[in-house]
Each structure stands twice: as structure tokens, then as C-alpha cells.
Amino acid sequence: MSLTLMKIYLVSSTDSPEFTRLKCSFARSTVIALDAEWKPQRSSSSSFPIVTLLQVACRLGHDFDDVFLIDLTSIHLPSVWGLLNDMFVSPDVLKLGFRFKQDLVYLSSTFTQGGCEGRFHEVKHYMDITGIYNHLQHKRFGRKAPKDIKSLAAICKELLDISLSKELQCSDWSHRPLTEEQKLYAATDAHCLLQIFDVFKSNLVEEITLQDPKHINVGLKDILNGSDCTSKIVTAKLCKAADVIRAMTQNGQNIANGVVSRKTTLNTMPMDENLLKIVRKYGERILLKESDLLPRISKKKTRRRTSLKNEKTDKHLVCSMDWQGPPPWDSSLGGDGCPKFLLDVMVKHYMDITGIYNHLQHKRFGRKAPKDIKSLAAICKELLDISLSKELQCSDWSHRPLTEEQKLYAATDAHCLLQIFDVFKSNLVEEITSQDPKHINVGLKDILNGSDFTSKIVTAKLCKAADVIRAMTQNDRQEVWRKDPVEGV
């Protein structure tokens, strides 16, 4: 199946042409996908995160879909509240989302803090991608819904065969201007919901038709006078009548418009018959309670007191373990040359992949180090040609037992550093050799007792000694340690 392309529009003002197109797309779309982004915050925070970006992907029926990135940090929130709320409750628009209830809670809080008198309380005719995916898996293969919710990236990979990178999920979404990578990430997150729905649609329509084909052409009068058995398909008779009215021809709609009143001011196109079948069968309603709109500060006061007590204890331990006296690894300053803590060794022999990557890029292509640090996933893709999924980066790592996906994610994050270092290694050795070839065969004792000029190549003498040791063969190492034994290394 060919995937629909998208056009991305950043909406920062109600006076902009992008906002005008947003209103037109709302009027012409019967399927809209929703997503939101916010700056990550500490779990102990007593308030909801501030949503800084709302993504709205509109299906227009052309070769491309419109995806709008509504910048909630720039746009006047009271000016767009009514438009968004009408879309949320419109009976003519099917809303798609991925666990969107949490997003709606944060959106409602954000708009309230932004000066809006009303809140977002509900989303009508909503379908969650996860729920439908699990339903289809059960129908096809008899699989029960898994305990762990399958990620959006995993569903995209299985159904669309595309890798949905989640590396920017935890980036700072409050910083402006947004990077091009952030814009593409945000737009893709919403647009993929439309593409996934296309895969579901044919299966859902076929299933509904097979289950109850007699209700495809049911009449308006039959619905209004229907028995209790008939009303099981659609709960409210008035809603069922409205569905049929929207499925009529233009003349039929003109007659019906005088009978059925609308609760929204959003002028939208009616759904087609197949879409109506899906909404009748699988449409849900997100309804927020007052308790949903209250931040959860802490579960128990006693737990908070315990954590404060532990915090004081930890501070006391840290203070009591601070090393008093000269640095133990530096004999020139009075230390004995023997590290007392693991940290002493780890800091000495540390290499940052990002720093070395930027250094090599500068040496090869004359590029300056970018202002934004390149992500590990991006470096892996460039150097190793592997996609490092970051979708689990923001998962709950305190929960036990860890899932198999979390174990694999954590192990891969560390192992890829070794693979990247293999790529760097030959370049680094070549560069050092070309800068000062006389140090290729320099002795271990000479390095440890080297002059200030020598130490310019590698800052820490202990690190330079280790470099030489690793560059030698096994026989050479034995020979060095036999002739030039060094204490404390």
C-alpha cells in the first residue's frame, strides 16, 4: 500500500495564512489525528506539564495530508480554544490518537493557565490506535491483548514497515525556534496515525458488514421507531438518526438540517458510509472527570517523609565520604598513587563519543561543532547504519521486573558505544601518529616522566601509559613490565 505524503504547517498566530488553512482543513476533514508535545519534567512535580505543541493531521482525500503544528507558546490560546473544542466534540469528525487522554488532561491545564475560562472535557467519536490494533490481532490470530501496551513505533514498524524514531521525545519542546528535526518528528508522530488507520479501515468495514449487514441501509423512520433490539447498535436514537442524515445526499441534508440541531459551530463535511460503520462500532468517548484535572502531588505523606529522611541520610554519607587531603592518584601533589574510589579511575580514562565525533568531523570536513549535540541514535545511523530506537528512553526504569524490551534497549545503548569506538579508533591512531610520530615507540617510563611538552598530546600521564600498553603486543607488555616496573599504575 502506498503511503500518503504530508505537508507541514507551523501555526504561530491566528492572523497567519497557516491558521486560515487550518480552519479550512477542519471543515473538509472527516478524520483527524491528534498528538501533543511538552517539556519533560520531574515526576515529583506538583503541576501538569505545559503543552507547547499540538499536532493535528487532517485527512483531505488527496495525495497528501495537511499536518499542522500549533505552537501553543506563541499563539493566543483563548482565540483557538473554541475552534479546537468544536473539533473535539464534533459528531462529523473521527478523532484518532495514541493514549490521548493524558494529552487532553495536559492540554486542558495548559489552556486554563493561558487565560481560557473553559476546559477541554471530552473528545467524541474517538478511536485509540492501540485498542483497535489489539482487537485486530485477536480476530486474526486469536491473540489476547498484551499486558504491556505496544508502542506506536512498534505498530508502525509492523504495519507500515517504517522506523519511527523516538529519540526526540524527551527533547526540550519549550525551546524556540524548533529545529527542523523536531518539526519532522512531531508531524510524523501525528501523520502515522492516519496511515495506520488506512490499514485498519478495510478490515474494520469488512468485519462490521459480516457481523450485521442488515443495518447498512436502515431507514431514518426505522431507527426512530426501532425496538430495544435495534437500539443496541447505536445507543441514542437521535444520534443514530443524525448518522443517517449525514449519509444522505445534499438534498436530504438540507431537509434534515431543519430537524436535527448541532451542538458545535464547526462546519464540516459528513462522513462517508464506511466511516460511519467504523464510528458506530468502535467509536469511543474520552470524558474527563474533575479528579483527572487535579495534579497528583504525592501518594502518601508518610512516603514523602521517608524520602526526606533518606535524603538527609544520603547527604550525610556523601559528606563523610569526601576525600580529605591531596588527590590520591597524583603523587606529585602528595598522593600515594593508589586510587581510593572507582570514580578516580573512571574520570581519568573517560572518552565522550559526541566530543570525538565532532572533532573528527572538523578534521575530515572542516565542520565546526554544532550548537545542538548530535544524538547517539543519529551517530549510530551515520557510522554503523543501524537504527537505535529511543522509544523506551522515558519509560519507568524504577519498575520491576524490567521488560525484555527494556533490557535489550539498555544493553544496546551501552554496546553501540563499543561499536562506534571501533570506527573512531583507526582515525584517532592515525591522527596522533601524524601529529607526533616520535611517540609511536616511546617508552612507558619516558611517558610517566615526560616533560610538559610531551604531556600536550595526552593530558593525564596515566592515560598515556595505558595507551602505550594497549598498543603493544603481549610480548612487548611483558618486556616493559619486567624492565620498567611502575608502582601505582
Image (cartoon, rainbow, N blue to C red):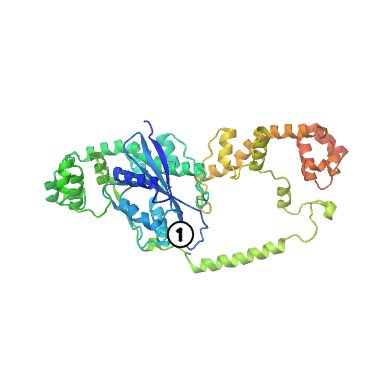
Q: Determine crowd level at label 1: few under 14, some 14-19, many 20+ residues with C-alpha closer than 10 A.
A: many
Q: Position of residue 54 (x, y in %)?
A: 42, 50
Residue at 52% in and 45% down = 406
Q: Is residue 217 left or right of residue 192?
A: left
Q: Is residue 336 left or right of residue 318?
A: right
Q: Is residue 481 left or right of residue 87?
A: right
Q: Position of residue 124 (x, y in %)?
A: 30, 52
Pick the residue in front: 315 or 103: 103
The N terminus lies in which quarter of the figure? Answer: top left
Pick the residue in front: 133 or 402: 133
The C terminus lies in which quarter of the figure? Answer: top right
Q: Residue furthest right?
A: 483
Determine which residue is flagged by label 1: 48
Q: Is residue 401 left or right of residue 199?
A: right
Residue 154 in view of the camera: yes
Q: Position of residue 458 (x, y in %)?
A: 77, 42
Q: Secondary structure at mark 1?
A: loop
Residue 404 in view of the camera: no
Going by the numbered disc 1, the residue's amino acid type is Phe
Residue at 38% in and 53% down = 101
State which quadrant residue 248 falls in: top left
Pick the residue in front: 175 or 470: 175
Does 276 appear above or below 439? below
